[in-house]
Amino acid sequence: MLGIFQQIQLPEILLLLLVALLLFGAKRLPEVGRSLGRSLREFKTGVKGLADDASEGLDEEGKQTSKGGPKEE
């Protein structure tokens, strides 16, 4: 999968930018870039939050099993 991205060179990048410019126009292109950046930032924050929650859950499980297991109420 990553091999595809390693083969992209300058001419391909310029072609993609030209197509984006033709599709969205010069006025909308900065807006699209900002929106894409915000979306990517929110996605990264969400993924990091899920990873943190998962690691906290694993830590709590380890503490419970080392203390003799979960307590039943």
Image: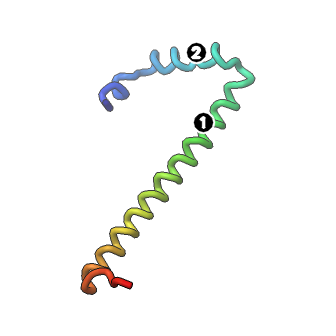
Spot the residue most to the right.
27
Q: Residue furthest front?
A: 73
Please tell me which residue is depicted at 34% across the width and 73% down the height of the picture: 59
Instruction: Check the image and report above or below for 26 versus 70.
Output: above
Residue at the image point whose x is 52% and y is 18% from the top = 16
Q: CA distance from mark 1 to mark 2?
A: 18 Å
Please give the residue where the numbered disc 2 appears in the rendered image.
Answer: 18
x and y percentages locating residue 13 in the rendered image: 48, 21
Task: Give the percent coordinates (x, y) of residue 33.
Answer: 63, 32
Estimate the x, y position of residue 40 in percent, counting from the top left: 55, 42
> Along the horizontal axis of the image, is 61 left or right of 49?
left
In the rendered view, does 64 fall on the left or right side of 51? left
Question: Nearest the camera: 23 or 57?
Answer: 57
The residue tagged 1 is 36
Looking at the picture, the colour scheme in use is: rainbow
Q: Residues within 10 Å of mark 1 (few under 14, many from 20)?
A: few
